[in-house]
Amino acid sequence: MNDNKEKILYDDGTHKCVMFSFDDEELGDSFLSVNQYLIIQKDSAVLVDPGSEAIFDELYDAVSRYIDVQKIKFVFLSHQDPDVSGSITQWAMSTKAKFVLSSLWVRFMSHYGFLEMTRIIPLNDKGAKLNFGADYLEFVPAHFLHSPGNFSLYDSRSKILFSGDIGAAIVTSMGEYKKVEDFDSHVKYLEAFHKRYMGSNKLCRAWVNRVKALELSKIAPQHGFVFEDENSEKFLDWLENLECGSDLIDDLF
Ligand code: FE
């Protein structure tokens, strides 16, 4: 196991959440840290935002060390971007999993070479709850944060919210797994990305409202570091008050 690239976020003996941080290392200076997640309960698993084709082999091997990949029941894609969904065809060929994503993006998946549309579970805008073992997974609407059809995934057992691009830190190196130690010194890695990529303050508030109603242990984004405890709260308070996207229209046109 590569300690720099794998971290167990939760394990109670029956239910486990693993964080992977595999990047396309050939990207050199344009490198952006990317996280992938695996949720396992007994004999089934869900893969969260598996990423680009370039990291497929590495992630496949890593997942195989935790569970037989044939036991992956669902692959969740928070949105359509290549660093999230680019490997959909590879996962389709190597598993029997169903793919859960916004109905807005279903037809676009063929552009990644994916043609088995009957294996997609399309989510309507309001999201859904899916039974998972004795617990459930909730797909929480996160539209325009940043993608027009976008969801976060809440795992009711671990109480981790897999937040996709929300909370993403733009850092060029993860080093060892790092959680946010101090929100105030971390915010510089969030600011530019969220101001430009998130749709508007109104949309941020709608998401924060939904998320504040959940019992949370961690917020785990697709890029950068994991938020825990008071840093999760500080992040939600910050996002709730952030001017972004269309709020800053005068800077754009
Ligand atoms: Fe994205």
Image (cartoon, rainbow, N blue to C red):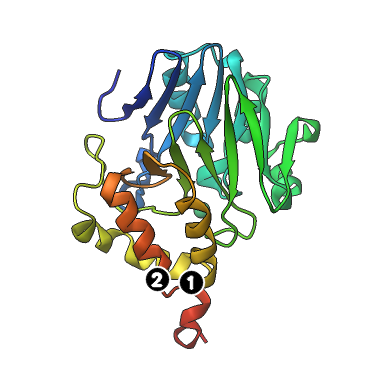
Q: Nearer the viewer, residue 198 or 217?
A: 217
Query: What is the three-letter code of the residue carrying label 1?
Result: Asn
SS for callout 2: loop
Distance Cα–Cα, label 2 vs label 1: 6 Å
Q: Which residue is pictured at 31% across the width and 45% down the height?
A: 225
Say whether residue 58 is visible.
yes
Q: Which mark is residue 201?
A: 1
Query: What is the three-letter code of the residue carrying label 2?
Result: Leu
Q: Nearer the viewer, residue 12 or 96?
A: 12
Q: Which mark is residue 187?
A: none
The answer to whether mark 2 and mark 1 are in CB contact below 8 A is yes
Q: Which residue is pictured at 39% across the width and 53% down the height?
A: 167
Q: Ligand 1: does it lie within 8 Å of the C-beta at label 2?
A: no
Q: Which residue is mark 2?
A: 242
28 lies left or right of 133? left
Q: Which residue is pictured at 36% across the width and 49% down the height?
A: 32
